[in-house]
Amino acid sequence: MAILIDGKSVSAAERELIKKQISDMSVKPGLAVILVGEDPASQVYVRNKKKACADVGIYSESYDLSAQTTQQELLALIDKLNKKADIHGILVQLPLPKHIDETAVINAIIPEKDVDAFHPVNVGKIMTGDYDFLPCTPAGVMCLLKHYNIDPAGKECVVVGRSNIVGKPQAMLLLHANGTVTICHSKTKDLKEKCLTADILVVAIGKADFITGDMVKEGAVVIDVGINRKSDGKLTGDVDFASVEPKASYITPVPGGAGPMTITMLLKNTVKAAEIKGE
């Protein structure tokens, strides 16, 4: 029977540390959150981010823009926030409406305020291991492993998914932690065989219940980053929990596993941005 990795309790403990850190700072960290359009899931995420900021003592501003907002208008707002002294972090909630170029928007945020760590400068720093910020979801996964004393050093680590937001940076962070890393994706041959080699399996492929028990070796640590809504409205991950849990040594539930850590790492990045500015 696997040990459940409890993201809620780890997240709560981390937020207490962040709150204490902020109370000792001479500058109050500030975060601007921009939402374009009325995507219901994005609205929930933004609401949660604002609440989390208030809970730990981060000043936040939110900009809810209509779906008709032009790229030029959005870039002008980012330019204004880049220059705003009391704002240390800028987050544009993705996805954006189709008429707006996401790459142009990500590149417009100055690297020192890019608390999502999506800017090419920050991506390059993650490659070399000399970074200021880490993408929030992979950083949350590493934080969970640390809390449960799971050391990737020398272990076979398999990441299923190669997105810029999760898969690629996750692989780099496991590599920096001295794991031996394999990245799998939709074109991988013998995916099952690759997964069966994993001591640590991180799944971020965006397909409900995709990884099943026969794809996981006995005693593996399984981290499910996916979040999918089933036809009955229930949330499920990319891992079929019922068949995988009996074989794993540790596993994250969905919800309540990797999910709660993402916003916590955003708070951490915002505090770091304020500290760098204050140096």
Image: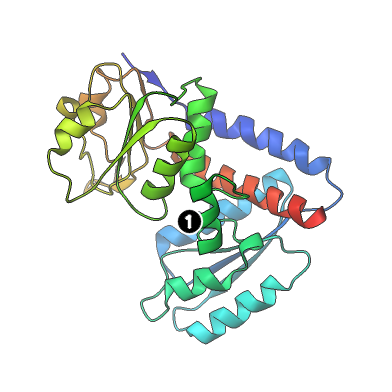
Looking at the picture, the colour scheme in use is rainbow
Give the total number of marks visible in the rendering. Answer: 1
Q: What residue type is labelled 1?
A: Val
The x, y position of residue 41, in whole percent, is: 41, 58
Quarter of the figure that contains the N terminus: top left
Q: Quadrant of residue 113?
A: bottom right
Which residue lies most toward the left here? 190
Considering the numbered disc 1 on the image, is that residue within a helix, a strand or a loop? helix
**214 in relation to 73, above or below:** above
The x, y position of residue 72, in whole percent, is: 53, 86
- Nearer to me, 127 or 90: 127
Which residue is found at the position 76% from the left and 39% from the top?
21
Q: For residue 55, say whether it is visible.
A: yes
In the image, is 198 to the left or to the right of 31?
left
Crowdedness of circle 1 by 10 Å Cα count: few (<14), some, many (20+)?
few
The x, y position of residue 29, in whole percent, is: 75, 54
- Nearer to me, 164 or 5: 164
Q: Quadrant of residue 278?
A: bottom right
Q: In which quarter of the image is residue 203?
A: top left
Which residue lies most toward the top here? 1
Which residue lies most toward the front here? 128
In the image, is 81 to the left or to the right of 259?
right
Residue on which disc 1 sits: 44
Which residue is found at the position 59% from the left and 69% from the top?
109
The x, y position of residue 258, in whole percent, is: 44, 37
Q: For residue 117, say whether it is visible.
A: no
